[in-house]
């Protein structure tokens, strides 16, 4: 007679525990979800990754998707008219057409390929893309939450930003065009926010505004997005530094590597601003055609999500190079590579295409999730990389 009673009590305990678990989950309401995908500009027809993203977004209106640059390969939108430029525009419109019925928010920021692959016509090709994107979204009557605000940022077009948006859940989103800073550093044409200021003054304004935007934020959560990553074990972090020749061509060729003069200057200054903040900050970028996640003990997260339409190799030993170290003297701010898991035979290994998802909850907690084409399909929940 005692055994049935024991089973009954055990069932009650299990049920009670399960009910408590469900109750805790229900209380921690999802406030907003952000999708991060970069370097989507290679496909002429929507591939598995873009279709997977579409499937996620069309059933998730309480969300924001951010395209992290290199939206059109190889040299951005060179001509605006279809008859002169069918391929460049096709690569852009297939991304847009997937999201005509999307009822969340959508933002595009530029990368180096959108600036004519660091070419002299970069400013023009950037303007071509920005204007075409905005006009296309209006002409096709997209259902976006940010329809009136616009989808190509920062504004004014061809300037570095920073541009801020407050997302649901009181998350501060900061959007920056890092290629502006690199383009300017090698003497290429760039835009300014006012005819009354010089390019030098524009850059000073950028750094002042960025520091004030982060240090003065009332939001506890900040998402800082740009095209160029802070840390990387991809190709842009793997190449040997070498001596600075001072040659203009050499500077241009090195401009997209982590140690490139303009790029490294951005990294050092931006990291100092991030390190000085007591906020939880996610810095997300593309550029490398793979998926990486770094973090530290100080509440700072660094994401590389540039595998929207291409994939390139990992070079795991590069994580110990000096340019993959946080310049801070605070040991809590030293970064660690969390994803991918480093393996001995990993060098040169190609990876899947995919994207990141950030979930923000009412409790103030968040999750960082990755989805890639190596999964059976993108309908799966994805791989949880980090959770508070």
Image: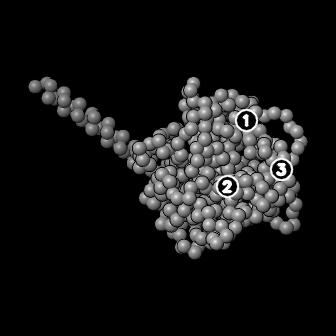
Identify the image quadrant of residue 163. Answer: bottom right
User: Could you say which quadrant of the image residue 189 lies in?
Assistant: bottom right
Instruction: Answer whether labels 3 and 2 touch (C-beta < 8 Å).
Output: no
Residue drawn at the location 87% of the way across and 66% of the way down: 196
Q: Nearer the viewer, residue 118 or 231?
A: 118
Q: CA distance from mark 3 to mark 2?
A: 21 Å
Residue at 68%, 59% in the rendered image: 76
Assign a secondary structure to mark 1: loop
Disc on the earlier residue, 3 or 2: 2
| Left or right of residue 357, residue 201 in this image | right
Circle 2 residues within 10 Å: few <14, some 14–19, many ≥20: some
In the picture, the quarter occupied by the N terminus is: top left
Tell me residue 243's x, y (percent): 85, 34
Single out the mark in the foreground, 1 or 3: 1
Residue 207: x and y in percent read: 79, 51
Viewer-proximal residue among 262 and 9: 262
For numbered disc 2, what is the local secondary structure?
Answer: loop
Bin the neighbour count of mark 1 within 10 Å (Cα to Cα): few under 14, some 14-19, many 20 and up. some
Residue 74 is marked as 2
Of tags 1 and 2, the one toward the viewer is: 2
Left or right of 223? Residue 240 is right
Look at the image and tell me whether residue 123 can be seen: yes
What's the distance in space between the residues labelled 1 and 2, CA to CA? 21 Å
**Mark 3 highlights which residue?**
185
Q: Are marks 1 and 2 in contact (CB under 8 Å)?
A: no
Total numbered labels placed on residues in the image: 3
Per the rendering, the mark at residue 239 is 1
- The Cα–Cα distance between marks 1 and 3, rounded to whole angstroms, is 20 Å
């Amino acid at each position: 007679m005692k055994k049935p009673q024991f089973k009954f009590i055990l069932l009650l305990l299990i049920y009670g525990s399960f009910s408590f678990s469900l109750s805790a989950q229900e209380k921690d309401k999802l406030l907003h979800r952000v999708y991060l995908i970069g370097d989507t500009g290679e496909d002429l027809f929507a591939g598995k990754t873009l279709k997977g993203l579409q499937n996620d977004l069309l059933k998730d209106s309480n969300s924001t998707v951010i395209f992290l640059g290199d939206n059109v390969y190889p040299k951005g939108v060179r001509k605006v008219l279809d008859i002169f430029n069918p391929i460049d525009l096709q690569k852009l419109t297939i991304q847009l057409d997937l999201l005509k019925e999307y009822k969340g928010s959508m933002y595009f920021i530029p990368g180096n390929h959108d600036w004519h692959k660091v070419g002299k016509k970069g400013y023009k090709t950037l303007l071509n893309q920005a204007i075409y994107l905005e006009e296309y979204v209006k002409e096709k009557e997209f259902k976006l939450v940010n329809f009136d605000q616009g989808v190509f940022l920062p504004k004014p077009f061809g300037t570095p930003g920073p541009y801020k948006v407050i997302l649901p859940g009181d998350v501060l989103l900061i959007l920056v065009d890092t290629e502006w800073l690199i383009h300017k550093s090698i003497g290429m044409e760039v835009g300014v926010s006012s005819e009354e200021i010089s390019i030098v003054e524009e850059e000073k304004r950028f750094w002042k505004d960025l520091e004030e935007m982060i240090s003065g934020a009332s939001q506890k959560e900040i998402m800082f997005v740009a095209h160029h990553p802070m840390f990387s074990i991809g190709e842009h972090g793997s190449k040997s530094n070498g001596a600075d020749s001072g040659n203009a061509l050499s500077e241009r060729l090195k401009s997209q590597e982590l140690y490139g003069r303009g790029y490294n200057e951005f990294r050092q200054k931006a990291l100092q601003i991030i390190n000085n903040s007591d906020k939880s900050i996610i810095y997300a970028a593309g550029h490398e055609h793979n998926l990486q996640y770094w973090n530290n003990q100080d509440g700072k997260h660094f994401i590389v999500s540039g595998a929207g339409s291409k994939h390139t190799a990992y070079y795991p030993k590069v994580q110990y190079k000096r340019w993959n170290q946080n310049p801070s003297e605070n040991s809590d701010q030293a970064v660690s590579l969390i994803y991918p898991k480093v393996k001995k035979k990993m060098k040169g290994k190609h990876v899947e295409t995919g994207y990141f998802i950030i979930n923000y909850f009412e409790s103030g907690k968040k999750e960082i999730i990755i989805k890639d084409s190596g999964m059976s399909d993108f309908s799966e929940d994805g791989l949880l990389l980090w959770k508070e």
